[in-house]
Amino acid sequence: MLYNLVMKNYYSISELAEILGKSTETLRRWDRDGKLTAVREPMSNYRLYKKDQLQLFPEFQDFITRKSSEGNFTKPNQKYAVLELFAGAGGLAIGLEKAGLECIALNEIDKWACQTLKKNRPNWNVLEGDIKNYDFSEFKNKIDVVTGGFPCQAFSYAGKKLGLNDARGTLFYEFARVVNEVKPPICIGENVKGLLSHEKGKTLEGMISILDEIGYNVVTPVQVLKAINYNVPQKRERLILVGVRKDINLEYNYPLPFKKVYTLQDALKKSDLYGSDVPKSEGTKYPKNKKKILDLVPQKGYWRDLPINLQKEYMQKSFYLGGGKTGIARRIGWDEPCLTLTCSPAQKQTERCHPEETRPFTIREYARIQTFPDNWIFEGSISQQYKQIGNAVPVNLGKEIGYSVVDFLNKYYNLNQENFAAISLDKAVMV
């Protein structure tokens, strides 16, 4: 398919910047100076770099020879318990469950998300309400991993080293507080890619400092995982922050990426990703004037594919501003992964129109793109359901993260047993 061909032979400026450890501005300067010339993607005019021209960079050689995975499956050697914070509609929790981990308790403040969790998993202990009102110390020494997609909030930097008390009032403080109360071997925080650069990196530095204070080493470099590399038909990126308790001398390894990239067709049609076409379901509609515009946009097209007079009419003042604005009036193609889903399926700046029908994706289509099971029911109004799905961690990404946690915990408990056996042997010899 075209997308796989592009992904195999061409790299975007943001991808190449990440691979080479350079800024996008440096790459733009190299392009202007003729040091590393980019080609232009016809539809968006984005810079693309051909694989052949990158072979001279050692960093690129390291990247392309890096091991990729045909699966991260690891069977748990025993039962492992999860405490899930900011659980939402359960995307990460289902993924962890699929990896063999057991959710002992889940906290979530949104009442409709809680209804969703209770509806689908009546056996789960759903702690509904503000995390600030819960004391989790009862779970101390009973939990193997604390997970949570805490919202990104800035801190007040009073001193050189940010401490736990300085983070009071933020939801990361609550995440760290719970980890400190429970003291699991490992904790996993999940957030948007923008956390890397938030407040010029100081917010992430503060989080690492706080975890250090409560006895956890953060695995560095902190990685952003691309969902398309983990059997998710969506260009979604999530930052995964991993903390390992300081008394544990073990390395945590992020899940390896898969070679195959799934497309929207794989999500909505019968494929090896789903065994049937997507079920029919409710969904929102476009107003007449918007539908009239989007009817003219081809697959994989956007507002620039409209006649020039309609471009100006639809974009208004934005027409004369810089930037590609490629999310506006955007129709997704069958042969590419979907763009990142948002909490509302018909926002002007982040349009995701169905490939053939002029409408937003339905609830079940939204859920498929996030790799939720077809039998996972979402509670609340249509808008509440879209919000829950759009906020979720893709289930398949959560599963691969789960396997990496299982691998770590298997090694940790095996090592503990070996140490216990060695101590017992020493004692026997002494006697």
Image (spheres, rainbow, N blue to C red):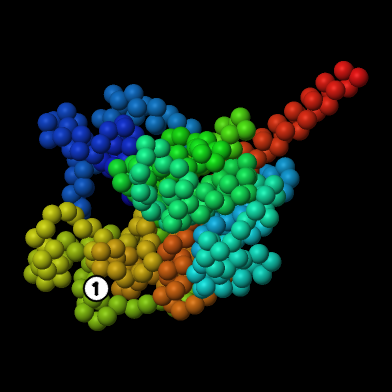
Relative to 57, is 175 on the left or the right?
right
Q: Quadrant of residue 312?
A: bottom left
Question: Quick one: 142 or 271, which is closer to the camera?
Answer: 142
Q: Residue at x 21, y 70 (%)?
A: 296
Question: Quick one: 419 or 60, which is closer to the camera?
Answer: 419
Most extreme residue toward the top, as rendered?
430
The residue pinned by badge 1 equals: 295
**Rendering coords of residue 363 (x, y %):** 45, 72
Total label count?
Answer: 1
Q: Quadrant of residue 36?
A: top left
Relative to 325, is 281 on the left or the right?
right
Q: Residue at x 67, y 57 (%)?
A: 104
Relative to 180, is 75 on the left or the right?
right
Residue 97 shows in the view: no
221 shown above or below 334? above
**Rendering coords of residue 197 (x, y %):** 32, 44
**Rendering coords of residue 381 (x, y %):** 46, 79
Most extreme residue toward the bottom, as rendered?
288
Q: Quadrant of the C terminus?
A: top right
How many residues crowd mark 1 within 10 Å: few (<14), some (14–19), many (20+)? Answer: some
Q: Amino acid at mark 1?
A: Asp
Most extreme residue toward the right, as rendered?
431
Q: Residue at x 31, y 31 (%)?
A: 20
**Rendering coords of residue 244 (x, y %):** 57, 38
35 shown above or below 46? above
Residue 408 shows in the view: yes
Question: Quick one: 233 or 138, which is closer to the camera?
Answer: 138
Q: Residue at x 39, y 66 (%)?
A: 343
- Secondary element at image label 1: loop
